[in-house]
Image (tube, rainbow, N blue to C red):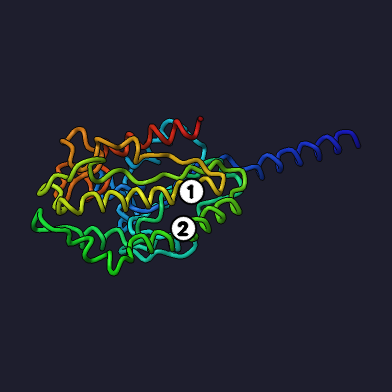
């Protein structure tokens, strides 16, 4: 009798232990470049402009993790990892709410909105291919405002990576940088991308500076960089439809202006899978 009771007790403990051990999870964190605005099919909360075909969802088709969470949201900043993002209709809960001790893989793409990507893009579009209105606005008395913002965002990205490690200590963390918007050489493709020719090298350098900061933070925090920027050279918004990964100011494919299209998401998904398995 005692043997049977003991055996039953052991079995119960094993069942409880198995129940307490949650299935491994893949969590995607980030902003609109991770979310995929206007790429069908859009998912709730709809104010986040998040696609069922963003790179995390596509990668999950290959990974097939038992648990998958994608709280990415257009407009997200580093602060939205720990605070609610008010979108309409919404809201989008703090993205860190989707992390757990059992999270095995995390992708992170963040920082563009912290430096004011949308306002910079608007300010640097020009009705004329001549001049350098973008530099006139952002470089004053030798002080570069965009470089200052990038430097100020670095510790915020560092804090996000610390927060991921604290909540998901066993997770492999992939930091995804930003796809090339302008060609890697030359002076652009005005008017398809209405940036003054003398501003194109400057804007390209600022994107490279942002991506270099993300690479530095990834390295400092033991994360793996997914270098989408390097892979996307030749697939910028000046490239032909069917080649480009990022849409120009007037999109031809279903995607937001100056954001990855489905082809870009598919390419990023391939890189995420390779980095996770590497």
- Residue 176 in picture, x, y percent from top left: 41, 44
Along the line of sight, the residue nearer the viewer: 74 or 234: 234
Q: Which residue is mark 2?
A: 154
Q: Is residue 185 above or below residue 202?
A: above
Q: Residues within 10 Å of mark 1 (few under 14, many from 20)?
A: some
Along the line of sight, the residue nearer the viewer: 143 or 220: 143
- Residue 110 in picture, x, y percent from top left: 41, 53
- Residue 72 in picture, x, y percent from top left: 39, 52
In the displayed structure, does residue 100 sit left or right of residue 206? right
Q: Residue at x 38, y 63 (%)?
A: 149
Q: Residue at x 36, y 47 (%)?
A: 34
Q: CA distance from mark 2 to mark 1?
A: 9 Å
Q: Is residue 131 above or below residue 264?
A: below
Q: Is residue 167 above or below residue 66?
A: below
Q: Secondary structure at mark 2?
A: helix
Q: Is residue 115 above or below residue 58?
A: below
Q: How many marks?
A: 2
Q: Which residue is mark 1?
A: 216
Q: In the current view of this chain or complex, which residue is farthest to the front?
A: 142
Q: Are marks 2 and 1 in contact (CB under 8 Å)?
A: yes
In the displayed structure, does residue 186 sit left or right of residue 58? left
Dot 2 or dot 1: first in sequence order is: 2
Q: Which mark is residue 103?
A: none
């Amino acid at each position: 009798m005692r043997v049977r009771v003991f055996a039953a007790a052991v079995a119960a403990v094993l069942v409880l232990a198995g129940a307490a051990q949650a299935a491994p999870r893949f969590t995607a964190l980030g902003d609109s470049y991770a979310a995929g605005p206007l790429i069908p099919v859009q998912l709730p909360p709809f104010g986040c402009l998040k696609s069922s075909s963003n790179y995390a969802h596509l990668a999950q088709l290959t990974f097939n993790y038992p648990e998958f969470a994608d709280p990415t949201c257009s407009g997200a900043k580093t602060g939205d990892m720990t605070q609610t993002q008010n979108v309409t209709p919404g809201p989008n809960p703090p993205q860190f709410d989707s992390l757990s001790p059992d999270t095995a893989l995390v992708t992170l793409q963040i920082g563009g909105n912290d430096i004011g990507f949308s306002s910079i893009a608007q300010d640097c579009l020009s009705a004329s291919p001549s001049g350098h209105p973008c530099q006139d606005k952002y470089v004053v008395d030798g002080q570069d405002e965009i470089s200052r913002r990038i430097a100020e965002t670095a510790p915020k990205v560092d804090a996000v990576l610390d927060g991921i490690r604290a909540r998901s200590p066993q997770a492999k963390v992939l930091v995804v940088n930003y796809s090339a918007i302008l060609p890697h050489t030359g002076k652009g493709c005005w008017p398809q991308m209405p940036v003054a020719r003398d501003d194109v090298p400057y804007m390209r350098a600022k994107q490279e500076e942002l991506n270099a900061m993300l690479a530095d933070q990834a390295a400092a925090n033991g994360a793996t960089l997914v270098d989408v920027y390097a892979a996307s050279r030749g697939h910028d918004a000046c490239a032909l439809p069917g080649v480009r990964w990022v849409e120009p100011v007037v999109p031809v494919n279903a995607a937001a202006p100056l954001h990855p299209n489905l082809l870009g998401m598919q390419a990023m998904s391939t890189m995420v899978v390779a980095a996770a398995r590497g």
